[in-house]
Amino acid sequence: MPSSSAKPTDCLAFQHPISYFKQTTDYPTFSDLQHLMERAGPAIREEDHTIEATPSSPGLHENAIPKNNPAQAKQYSLTKLFVGLLNTVLFLVLILLLLGTGLTTQLESFVRTMVENDYLVLLGFTLVLGVGEGLIGFPLKIYSGYFLEHRYGLSNQTLARWFLEGLKGSLIGAAISGPVLLALFWCLRSFGVLWWLPVGILMFLLSVVLARLAPVILFPIFYKFKPLDESHLKERVVALCEKVGMRVSGVFVFDMSKNTKKANAAFTGIGKSRRIVLGDTLIANFTDEEIETVVAHELGHYKLRHLRTMIVTGTLSTFAGLYLTAQLYSVSLDWFGFSGGDTIAALPLLGLWLAVYSFVTTPLGNIISRAHERAADYFAVQLTGKKQAFTNALTKLGRINLADTTPHPLVEFLFHSHPSIERRIRSLEGMQVP
């Protein structure tokens, strides 16, 4: 179930492709995988579910309905936003300093004293920069990802588990970004000014592969999945899927409570790997009707072909972005004294332009995303006929996720991929239930 600021992607691979490309070529930690699985809020106890608490989910039954505290929610949301923007500014300033002072050239020369092969030089160059950026950005990362979440009572993670999850994410990110970097470098050398075209094709194919493999290979590295037990809830979920003509490989529960008090439901994968996943906190603490409307909302994205729309617009954005950044990259090489686009020391400049493009165009993607969310809300109510259960779920998720239900319109426009919860509920008030 989406929150007020998360993206409605059905799998990791179909986020904003340029943003994803920047992550896979810019020393990623793969934290987006975690964010995908934590798009909503911590669960609360309701009347018609029971589940045994596990060692990894202490107090699973003890979550009480938080009091409505708009001031605290706004403070939390603005702090997260400020830290995110500060991290972005830090990245841009760091890259500009490295380029402007000639440190990237010195670093390339230093790596060449140890290895001669250009592709090995690239990997070594990237590793050193990645470690350096990670160390510089670490205070913001641990504050936002660990201390802030604990301060507001949203996390179940110990510090050791937080480090472990981050390490796993970094290793997976390196395993994916390494081949992508090598392929990018090969395209820069082989295709000259047209390098953006094969790279765009490569990114599309990579997205398809990740969409297929993420649910069965990547997600289980972070969470344990098991089939949902036979129950009235499973019957409802399966019936909803059959009603809209959607085939899934199964309905699964994952141990979300090991890391967070939040709850979530989502569809992941494409083709034969498509499945429904429900957080254990959602199963334990939400009513059948509420879960049914949450699943119906996600089914709305499928039935209304939102994923197809996002794939098409995302692919077009990827090619347009790569083309534009290729032109800007070519023009700006002289600014820093680089002789060609395949100069290893110049590649952070390409990452800089990709980041700028992503930052500028993300609000446009959010406009489409918010429209999709509104349409999926209507679809959920029409499909289930349970408007009250759905609005209850939205209200509940807003409170327990400390979502800013009334963000400033400019903040919502620039940064929120979902309409505010207050807007979503208000838009449903006049809707006629079938």
Image (cartoon, rainbow, N blue to C red):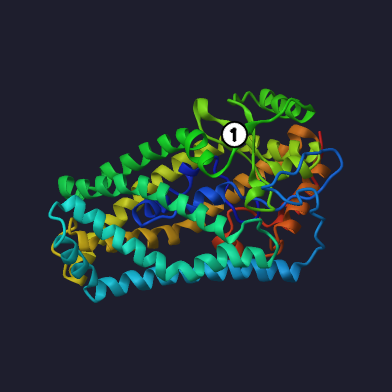
Q: Which residue lies furthest to the bottom in this view?
A: 101
Dot 1 lies on which element? helix
Q: Quadrant of residue 299?
A: top right
Q: Where is residue 138 in the image (x, y as percent from the top left)?
A: 46, 67
Residue at image coords 46%, 33%? 212
Q: Where is residue 314 in the image (x, y as percent from the top left)?
A: 44, 45
Residue at image coords 15%, 56%? 115
| Mark 1 Cα-neighbour bin, 10 Å: few <14, some 14–19, many ≥20 | some
Q: In this view, does 102 lie above or below 117?
A: below
340 on left or right of 372: left
Question: In the rendered view of the protein, which quadrant contains the C terminus?
Answer: top right
Q: Which residue lies furthest to the right in this view?
A: 47
37 on left or right of 428: left
Number of on-image labels? 1
Q: Is residue 251 above or below residue 17?
A: above
Q: Position of residue 346 (x, y in %)?
A: 22, 63
Q: Quadrant of residue 264?
A: top right
Question: In the rendered view of the protein, which quadrant contains the N terminus?
Answer: top right
Residue at image coords 59%, 34%? 302
Q: Which amino acid does label 1 sit on?
A: Tyr
Q: Position of residue 290 (x, y in %)?
A: 78, 41
180 on left or right of 7: left
Q: Can residue 410 be seen in this view?
A: no
Residue at image coords 63%, 32%? 226
Q: Can residue 64 be seen in this view?
A: yes
Residue placed under numbered mark 1 in the picture? 302
Q: Is residue 277 above or below residue 139?
A: above
Of residues 297 and 266, which is closer to you in this image?
266
